[in-house]
Amino acid sequence: EARDLVALAAVLPAHGVTVALVEQPWRVAGKKVAPAPKTLDTGWRGVRPALTKPGLPVISGGRSAGARVACRTAVELGAHAVLALSFPLHPPGRPEKSRADELLGAGVPTLVVQGGNDPFGKPAEFPAGDHELVEVPQADHGFAVPKRADLTQEEALRVVTDAVVRWTAGLA
């Protein structure tokens, strides 16, 4: 599991947020590259109803390709909000291949938590919009920080968890 997802699953329940970790089928199959967006969205549409409880809001979330899925399907699936971890704004070195429209089209309150050195899009590259953006200084796409960084790995993960705890508390 990704370090940020594990950290959030450990921290959020104490704040009244239930977390369901869903491993995407392509990852279970051992593939390194996500399939086409339509395939990912279809998979999420199949899982999402099992995560819904009457009367409780659902925050659709994901990291990387999963963040894109959450944004694309939020309104259709009735999400209350979207948590986008390491949103891949563009392929590394290809800012002209922007995926900003997926983020900007989420249609619900959205929090993006992005590494300051993410090759898929640094925080300064993100367009203005109805989303909130939190930077994890010096972190890469997996929120790993170099040993020489100004903050430890534990502190970097705390930036992620603290931001999400604060944001979810403000959604009520």
Image: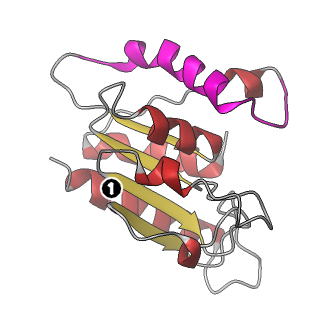
Q: Is residue 100 left or right of residue 89?
A: left
Q: Residue furthest front?
A: 96
Tell me which amino acid carries mark 1.
Val
Within 10 Å of disc 1 (Cα), the crowding (few <14, some 14-19, many 20+) is some
Q: Quarter of the image containing the N terminus? A: top right
Residue 34 in the image, given as x and y percentages of width and height: 75, 34
Quadrant in the picture for residue 117: bottom right
Q: Residue at x 39, y 45 (%)?
A: 106
Dot 1 corresponds to which residue?
Answer: 165
> Magenta span: helix, strand or loop, mainly?
helix
Q: Which residues, given as a range, are shown in magenta?
A: 30-53
- Nearest the viewer among 126 and 155 is 126
Residue 34, magenta (yes or no): yes
- Residue drawn at the location 36% of the way across and 26% of the way down: 76
Residue 92 position in % (x across, y down): 78, 62
In the image, is residue 47 above or below residue 135? Answer: above
Q: Secondary structure at mark 1?
A: helix
Image coords of residue 138 (percent x, y): 65, 78
- Could you say where residue 68 lies in the image, as x and y percent from the top left? 55, 43
Q: Is residue 139 left or right of residue 29?
A: left
Above or below for 170 versus 77:
below
